Image (tube, rainbow, N blue to C red):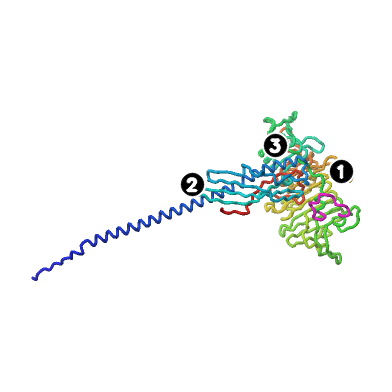
Amino acid sequence: MGPVRRSIRPRKERGIALVAAVLVVLLSTLLLAAFMSTTTGERSLSSNVQTAKMSLYAADAGIRTEQQRIANFAKTKMDSCVTAWNNAGSNTNNMIITSPATLFPVTYSKYSFTSASPSFSASGTIAWSDTDLTNLMQTYYYRCTIQSTGAAGGAGTRRVQSTCILQLSASRGLFSDYLMFMNSHTMSDGSAIWFTSSTTFDGRTHTNGKFHFAYKPTFQDLVTSVNASADYFNGGGTVRTLNANNNGTIDVPVFNGGFQRNQPNVPLPTDAYSQLNSALTNAGSTMTTPTNTAINAAIGASGSGTPATGIYVPSTGGVTVGGVTTGGVSSGGIYVQGDLTQMKMWADTTANKQWYQLTQGATVKTILVDRTAGQTKIWNSATTTGTAAVTLNNALKSGVVYVEGGISDLRGPDRSSGVVLPALAEGSNIMVTAQKDIVITRDVTDDSYAKQSNVLGIMTVNGGVRIGTSAPADINIDAFIMATATNSSSYGGWSSSSPGQFCVDSYDSGNSRGTCHVRGGIVEQYYGPFFTFDANSGQTLTGFSRDFHYDRRGMSPVCYPTTPRFGTLTPTARTTAWKEI
């Protein structure tokens, strides 16, 4: 057996593993420290960026807040000016703001505002810029400069500046703002007429006189009257006149929008010059009566005498060959001299075309308005076969139908198997105006009502708007209706038996005819009678009960009258420039 050999590790290699381990630990520590330092720095940088953003947001909040505060202050000033101007007679030749340059003080504490959350300090200046005055609206423009300093957490601020245009406007009130407007809440003979338990109105209601309430009528919107009191039926006993919203527990009207008494008078219009001028030459803003010479010229006649009885579609140009006229253009709407036996309207619901058929004794004109094709066609008969007698190269320029007389029968289509068919096509804005009575004998409704594209106005100046005895039960009417005549109104020796009212013929005879459904609004001199009711229960006995709903689609018929009083529109501040300073 040979000798055993032992391996001996050199002494100089001892401790190397320990040193390596220490170096690894040290390196890890350094890397960790560097990572922590980087993370802390990024967090600090992120925090600073966030603080800067929050400061900028706070500064911008100051701009927005100051804009709104200035607009609110401006409305207070404008309301005061409008009230004084209305009380002085509403003369549109005078400016509502008599001195626009001095309306706002040069320095004023309300131009500055400080907030703690969010933290900002804002201030502004206002200077008059321009004015736009018309018969229907007055607008005043002001240039506003606003500066705002914002802070977040006390760690720095940001400062911004905004320039904006402040617009102050006042415009004539619209009679189409009302569901029910009565100059006097009486019948034309002065006898009392009552809002009863069957009355439910969801739009604004106003009278320039005094209201009469019986039992529990319901009003969803604001009710206003010039008189400081109201009459209450008191169960058929002695009528009580009270400056109150109810008559104890006997007559308890529901005023969900409030009942304001002792309000300003709103005069009714007294003429139809706007509608007449629009029908002739589309000059609806002209508020004076045209001469016979001007009327004759518009309808293609001559001379200064009374226009000949007939149905006219005013136009210019055109060439007539073989009795057919083409190439002309409509210059207005439809003008009728004399009474109309019947006026029928219906809608082509497939092609959105509007049809009219006007009958005056033995004369019949059928008119097609095609907005899509840009054409108006006229047939001199009740049939529309063959070539139209006149083809105009545009749709009627005005939607006004003006009748220098009355309309004995205004109607839409007959019902089909009980279904109501529309009278107004989509996109139609029509205003039917007559000097004498207008009698509605069929449903008159809009096609695709929810699309908010069509609206009808019906107005008489010296007569009444009546629902005739041949009208169907539960009649439907989509229209804004106006009747402004008084008991003393007359037209060429003719006077109405129902002046200044929307009413039902033979309302007090026979049985109940169901309900009259109206979507629109009614403006009348007197509150026209619709039905009789049981004095004990308030239930309808004869005539039509009312189911009137305000048309909230935001549309008004062409040339529908406005009120002489102006009202303040909500001021707006439109930003034109924004920068950080």
- What residue do we see at 48% from left, 52% from top? 50
Residue drawn at point x = 69 percent, y = 37 percent: 259
Residue 370, quarter of picture: bottom right
Q: Residue at x 25, y 60 (%)?
A: 19
Residue with the mark numbered 3: 260
Question: How far from the left and from the top, in percent, is residue 73?
Answer: 65, 43
Pointer 3 local density, CA inside 10 Å: few below 14, some 14–19, many at least 20: some
Which of the two discs, 1 and 2, labels the residue nearer the N terminus? 2
Of 142 and 503, which appears nearest the observer?
142
Residue 81 position, x and y percent, is 71, 42
| Residue ID for mark 1 | 490
Q: Which part of the image, by quadrant, shows the N terminus?
A: bottom left
Are circles 1 and 2 on residues that touch, CB within 8 Å? Answer: no
- Please provide percent x and percent y for residue 393: 78, 63
Q: Residues within 10 Å of mark 1 (few under 14, many from 20)?
A: some
The residue labelled by disc 2 is 154
Observer-side mark, 1 or 3, equals 3
* Residue kind at label 1, given as amino acid type: Ser
Secondary structure at badge 3 equals strand
Residues rendered magenta in the picture: 279-294
Closer to viewer: mark 1 or mark 2: 2
- Give the residue type that dot 3 points to: Gln
Label 2 amino acid?
Gly
Image coordinates for residue 95, horizontal then vertical, percent = 75, 46
Whether residue 408 is visible to the viewer of this picture, yes or no, is no
User: Residue furthest toward the left?
Assistant: 1
Q: Is 315 in front, or is 190?
A: 315
